[in-house]
Image (cartoon, rainbow, N blue to C red):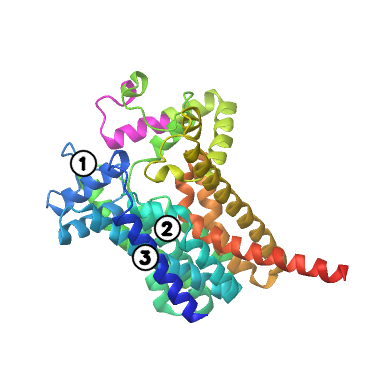
Amino acid sequence: MNRNIFFLLIFALIVRLYFVFIYPQSPVITDAKRYDVLGWNLASGNGFVNETGKAELGRGPGYPFFLAVVYRIFGHSYHYARFSQVLFSMFTLLLIFLLAKDTFGKNTAFLSLIIASFYPPFLSYNGILYAETLFTFFIALSSYLLFLGNRQKKWWIYILLGVVSGCAVLVRSEFILLFLCFFALTIIYSRENLKKFIYVALIAALVIAPWTIRNYKVSGRFVLVSSLFGSMLWISSYEGEWLEWHNDDPYYAGLIKGLDEVEKDKILWAEGIKNIKENPSRYLKSCFKYLGRFWIGGHSNTFYGLRDSLPNYFFAKAYGKVIIKVMFLIFNTALIILGGCGIMTAIRTLRDKKGELMFLISPIFIMMMMHTLLFGTARYQVPIMPLMIIFAAFGLFSLQQVRMELRKNEN
C-alpha cells in the first residue's frame, strides 16, 4: 500500500507539472489580474495597493502575500506562482489521505487519494492565479488539525490550528463562519477541549489583528479583513441576476460613484437589504438558483480552450468540446451525489464517530449556505471538495458492501 501511495503521488505531481508548464494556460485577467497586481506591488515595496495606487480593502491579504513571496524570490513569474500552487495541491492530497485514513480506514483513504489526484479542478486551478488552491489547502489542514486535536488533545496541535485558522481568514474572510461553526461543535461534541479551542480563537485573533489595524489606519474605519460582504449581498439580491460584475452598468456605477471601498460596501449592503425587503420572493428564488449553481458545474471552463459555454460550443458545432464539457459535468455531479450518499451513510452507520463526522461535514454545509445566500457559482465549491471526495470514496465502498450483501442473500 505504501509503495502504491508513493507512485500515485509521483504520478499526480507529474500530471500537475505537465499541466502548469506544458498545457496552455488562460490569460491572467479579471480576478487573477487583480491578485497579480496586489502581489507584485507588495513584492516591489509599494504596499498593498491596487492598479490605481490606492490602498486595497476589498480583498484579503493572504493570497496576494503568497504571490508576493513568490515574486520576491523568483521575480514576476507566473510559472513559479503556478509551481508553488502545485506544491500546495500536493500537500492537500496528503491531507486528504490522512484525514480519510483516520476517519474511514486505508481503503477509503487510497480511493480518495486516487480521485483527488486526478480531479479536474485540482489540476486546473493550479494554473489560475485565484485563491482557490491555497484556501482549499487551509480548509483541509484546519479540518485535519481539528480532528487530530480532538483525538490526541495535545497543545501544539491547537496552537498550530490557531495560526492556520488566522491565515485562512486572511485568505478568505468567510472562514470566520466556519470557525464559529467549529466553536459551536466543540461545545456540543468536545466540551472537554473547549478551553483549548478558546486559546485557538485567541491565537487566530492575534494573526488577524495586524491586518485589522492596518485597515483602520488606511481607512479610518473598522474592517476586520476585507469589505466584500455588501457587494456579495447586493449582487445576490439585484433584479438583474448578474453572474459577474458589470462595472459599466449605469445603475451600478451611479450607486458607487465617488465612494471608497468601505463606503461602497456599506451602501451596497444597505441596497441589498432594501432589495430583499422589497421583493423577498425574488431573493428566495435567486438563492435556489445560487444553490444549483454552487453544486452543478463541471469546471471545464477553467481549462484553456474550454472557457466558452456548452450551448455556444453546440451551436458552433464544436461537438468534441461539447462531449468533453458534458463528461466533466457528469463526473463532477456524480462525485457530489456519491459524496452526499457517503455523508448520509456515515451518519447512519458510524454513530460512535458522530462528533468527528460533524466536524468534517460542517465546512461543506457552511460553504454551501454561504454561497446560497451570498452569490454562488461552482468555483466556490472547490475548497470543500477534499471533504466531498472523502465521503464519495466512503459512499462507493458502502455501495459495494450493499451489493455484496444482496448477492450473499440471493445465494
The 10 Å Cα crowd at callout 1, few under 14, some 14 to 19, many 20 or more, is many
Residue in the image at 55% along x and 58% along y: 388
Q: Is residue 242 above or below residue 408?
A: above
CA distance for labels 2 and 1: 25 Å
Q: Amino acid at mark 3?
A: Ile
Query: Which segment did they paint magenta?
Result: 254-270
The 10 Å Cα crowd at callout 3, few under 14, some 14 to 19, many 20 or more, is few
Secondary structure found at label 2: helix
- Read off the residue under disc 1: 50
The rendered magenta stretch, by its main secondary structure, is classed as helix
With 148 as the anchor, is 18 left or right in this view? left
Q: Position of residue 361 (x, y in %)?
A: 57, 59
Q: Position of residue 88 (x, y in %)?
A: 35, 63
Secondary structure found at label 3: helix
With 69 as the anchor, is 105 left or right in this view? right
Residue 136 shows which numbered tag? 2
Residue 324 shows which numbered tag? none
- Read off the residue under disc 3: 14
- Nearer the observer: mark 1 or 3; the answer is 3
- Whichever of labels 1 and 3 marks the residue nearer the N terminus, that label is 3
Q: Is residue 185 above or below residue 40?
A: below
Q: Amino acid at mark 2?
A: Thr
